[in-house]
Image (spheres, helix red, strand yellow):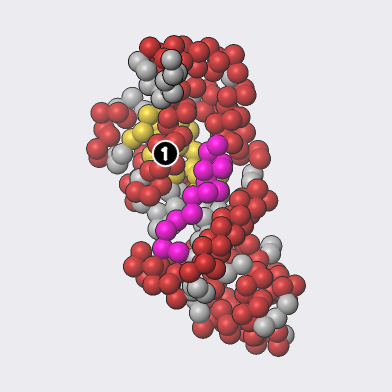
Amino acid sequence: MEHNVYQLMAEKMPLMSKSQKKIASYVLERTSTVPFLNVAKLAAEAEVSEATVVRFAVFLGYSGYPELQQAMQHAVKQQLSTTERLKMSSEMGEGREQAVYDLFHSDQENIRLTMEQLDVTAFFRAVEALLEARNIYISANRSAASLGVFLQYYLSVMLGNAERVGTVENSAEQLYKLGEGDVVFAISYSRYTRSTINMASYAKQQGATTIALTDSLLSPLIPNADIALTASSQLPSFIDSFVAPFSVVNALVAAIGKERMAEVEERLGKFEDIWDELDIFYKEERKT
């Protein structure tokens, strides 16, 4: 949806039922914190039933609460600085122990939402594109760099043609042959890194296949993505939750390994010989 979700709520307020008005009023008074509440928590805070919250989302034109929550998060994350998100997370705490468990529950919810919303067709298109790629370039910056490092490591072990790239300006030498047959895998989460967006845009201009892994279809990466993968990253904290994105990356790696089982086994066998020769891994010394 192109409109501002909060403006939409305000405009539709006169048409709402009494319970829906309670939810809208609660949300509009707490636009910085409500987007990070699950349906049960919002229902409890607004003193309505969970079913009423779901019907409220549908009334606004969304498929359900997850889509409404996604729109609210997109709106607020674009405006909040990291410092503001830190302040928000501290205000939402309900005690030290409960805060820890809330984070675990949030990550469970992220995986559940990601599973429910997974575009399986797009997922296997990504697998096929990576398998057929001449070269794979992975663009993931700032906190998302952890996802890029993990993906690049396993693709390099299995396929041997993956490398990480930085900004377009600093990666000119790596990208001078970029074109058809190559794949650029761009990963970015709100507040979205401009260099990753620029990399995806440049790759598309050069005719490379672009794969995006991001938090929603509202992400600025999506317009430049030939294949779009989303993974939920909702977390009531100043940090990004990458549990669900890592699950998607794990699934991609596993699917590629399954498709190229014989080739991957041969490569891993050779690597094992090298690792053993160079004494890479710790081995417990036998006592004599």
Query: Front-most of 284 and 245?
Result: 284
In the drawing, does residue 279 fall left or right of residue 56? left
Among the 4 quarters of the image, the one containing residue 5: bottom right
Q: Horizontally, is 83 left or right of 44 in the view?
A: left
The answer to whether residue 113 of the structure is visible from this angle is: yes
Q: Residue at x 27, y 34 (%)?
A: 171
Between 243 and 53, the residue placed more toward the observer is: 243
Mark count: 1
Looking at the image, the residue that sits furthest to the right is 51
| The C terminus - image quarter | top left
Residue sitting nearer the eye, 159 or 21 = 159
SS class, disc 1: helix
Quadrant where the N terminus sits is bottom right
Q: Is residue 173 left or right of residue 270?
A: left
Q: Is residue 224 magenta?
A: no
Q: Position of residue 82 (x, y in %)?
A: 36, 64
Pinpoint residue 104: horizontal percent, then vertical percent.
56, 57
Q: Residue at x 65, y 85 (%)?
A: 21
Kindly identify the amino acid type of the residue bearing the numbered disc 1: Gly
State the residue at coordinates (49%, 50%): 242
Q: Which residue is mark 1?
A: 148
Q: Residue furthest front?
A: 288
First to last magenta residue range = 237-250
Looking at the picture, tell me which residue is in the foreground, 168 or 248: 248
The answer to whether 191 appears left or right of 112 in the picture is left
Within 10 Å of the Cα at label 1, are there few (<14), some (14-19), or many (20+) other Cα atoms?
many
The residue shown at (62%, 72%) is 41
Counting from the top left corner in percent of width and height, residue 38 is at: 61, 67
246 inside magenta stretch? yes
Q: Is residue 249 above or below residue 219?
A: above
